[in-house]
Amino acid sequence: MHTQQFTDRISPRVRMPHHRPLPPRAPEGQSIISRSECMQSLLAEARLVAGSDASVLIQGESGSGKELLARLIHHSSPRAHAPFIAINCSAIPENLLESELFGHVRGAFSGATHTHPGLFEAANGGTLLLDEIGDMPLPLQAKLLRVLQERSVRAVGATRSRPVDVRILSATHCDLASARAEGRFREDLYYRIKVVGLRLPSLDERREDIPLLAEHFLQLIARRDNRRPRSLSPRALRALCMADWPGNVRELQNVIEQLCALSTTPRITLAHVERALQGPSSAPLSYAEAKARFEHDYLTRLLHLTAGNVADAARLAQRNRTEFYRLLQRHQLDPEGFRTRSE
């Protein structure tokens, strides 16, 4: 991959690369595209802490790459050969989150027709990422603290605990220090999960990485669609670098996807970028549109979480499988694609 070459002047606020190749691609799960000083310092610290077994709290805005950083820590650690499992604590109802984390035995509650090992056991020997841990309910925080202290887990409905060897990484976009002061997050758990704290900078703080990231996403999309990669005109790239990115890297990737989908020429122009950045967000959605968008995003998260297992996804959504299949068909979501991605 090579960066876009261009000659027109760019504002001193953003230094554009000239004739410098992109860094070589890292193995899947370890690739973080950056040359900014703040990110390089963070990555060096992350690789340093990866060698220990200390619990790490990763804080950063939504879309800034918290799970990607957690994967890098895992793959740089002595546990790299073992599982890396991530769970979004805000995406699962409280009554199901305990079962997902710790497991349950058959007959533990209504609907528990079989014994279900939790994610702590599934991640045994490896790493468990508790994403959006700031949204975890207080009663469950107490149970999590006990697991971390005793290094053993007792499934819901079980009479005995089982030892587990799991490294805990946590991530949140919340200010946990404020949540702790306000009583919304346990102080003892806070210090247990934050032996080391890492803060991911927002994309606005690392604007010199935008050309690298944009080129990276263009290449990924081209490989996925089996076509030649599109290129950005100098003015188009400058517009991307000057834009605000409240959604951070995730929003940038979404914009690049939109540019590739809507552009009819190999070269993406300033007009394309202006249209994508303006977007439909200024016009309020109708109730039906908002509901459809929420349903699609919710179903996608469930399929990601369950690796395309429709039975598990339907159970988490508290819907029967027939109704859940209808929802998937309505939103044209294929569970098989999520299963392949997970493998």
Image (cartoon, helix red, strand yellow):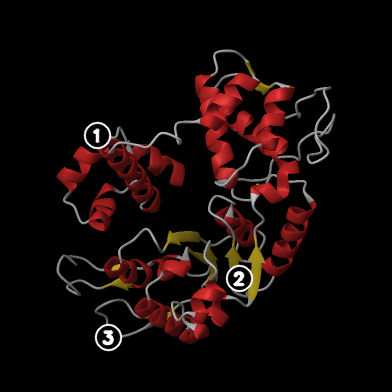
- The residue where tag 3 is placed is 159
Residue 218 vs residue 335, the one in the foreground? 218
Q: On the rendered image, what quadrant is the N terminus found in?
A: top right
The kind of residue tagged 2 is Val
Q: Position of residue 19 (x, y in %)?
A: 85, 29
- Which image quadrant for residue 316? bottom left
- The residue where tag 1 is placed is 329
The kind of residue tagged 1 is Gln
Q: Which mark is residue 56?
A: 2
Q: Position of residue 277 (x, y in %)?
A: 56, 32
The kind of residue tagged 3 is Thr
Residue at left offset 27%, top offset 69%: 95
As drawn, the residue found furthest toward the front would be: 283
Determine if residue 300 is in view. yes
- Which image quadrant for residue 193? bottom right
Density class for disc 2 (Cα within 10 Å; few <14, some 14-19, many ≥20) is: many
Q: Earlier in the sequence, mark 1 or mark 3?
A: 3
Q: In the displayed structure, would residue 4 be above or below residue 192? A: above
Residue 19 vs residue 245, the one in the foreground? 245
